[in-house]
Image (spheres, rainbow, N blue to C red):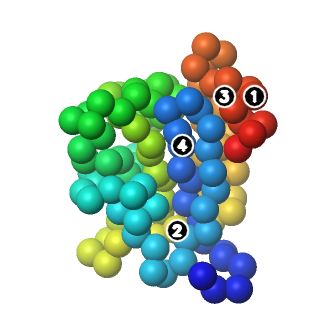
């Protein structure tokens, strides 16, 4: 990848509650980031989109309770299986990245709305 530091990002959240902040370069796609053949997206706001593996349920991937808890904040309850990816707006060319400030707000909300039962602090420390 480029040696230039990214100015746009995406956040990947695992079913165990761990998360990774990814540099979001113009060549990145939600499919590539999730390692999925097909992805589904849901707009949470004008500038925040959730991406999931379209086939995660059929592949019997674990429920992503931390993301489900976060979705309740946005009044968009749904079941989420497998890893989830948050980016900026979706377009016909893919997805925009999030600003650093948006990433901080998203992570803060994720931590605030994940229950102690679903978010293992040791997983976060290892991420």
Disc 4 to disc 1, C-alpha distance: 15 Å
Q: Secondary structure at mark 3?
A: helix
Q: Percent position (x, y) of residue 29?
A: 40, 69
In screen coordinates, is 70 left or right of 39? Answer: right
Q: Earlier in the sequence, mark 4 or mark 1?
A: 4
Of 39 and 46, nearer the camera is 39
Q: Which residue is mark 2?
A: 97
Residue 122's label in the rendered image is 1
The quarter holding residue 90 reads bottom left
Q: Earlier in the sequence, mark 3 or mark 4?
A: 4
Q: Earlier in the sequence, mark 4 or mark 2?
A: 4
Q: Nearer the viewer, mark 3 or mark 1?
A: 1
Residue that protrudes farthest toward the top in the picture: 117
In screen coordinates, is 8 left or right of 41? Answer: right
In screen coordinates, is 89 left or right of 56? Answer: right
Q: Percent position (x, y) of residue 36?
A: 33, 56
Q: Are marks 3 and 1 in contact (CB under 8 Å)?
A: no
Residue at 26% in and 59% down: 37
Q: Earlier in the sequence, mark 2 or mark 3?
A: 2
Residue 13's label in the rendered image is 4
Which quadrant, please, contains the N terminus? bottom right
């Amino acid at each position: 990848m480029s040696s230039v530091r990214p100015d746009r990002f995406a956040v990947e959240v695992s079913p165990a509650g761990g998360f990774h902040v990814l540099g979001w370069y113009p060549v990145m796609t939600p499919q590539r980031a999730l390692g999925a053949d097909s992805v589904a997206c849901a707009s949470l706001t004008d500038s925040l989109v959730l991406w999931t593996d379209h086939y995660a349920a059929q592949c019997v991937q674990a429920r992503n309770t931390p993301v489900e808890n976060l979705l309740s904040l946005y009044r968009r309850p749904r079941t989420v299986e497998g890893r989830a990816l948050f980016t900026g707006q979706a377009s016909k060319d893919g997805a925009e990245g999030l600003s650093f400030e948006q990433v901080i707000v998203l992570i803060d909300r994720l931590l605030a709305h994940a229950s102690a039962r679903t978010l293992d602090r040791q997983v976060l420390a290892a991420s």
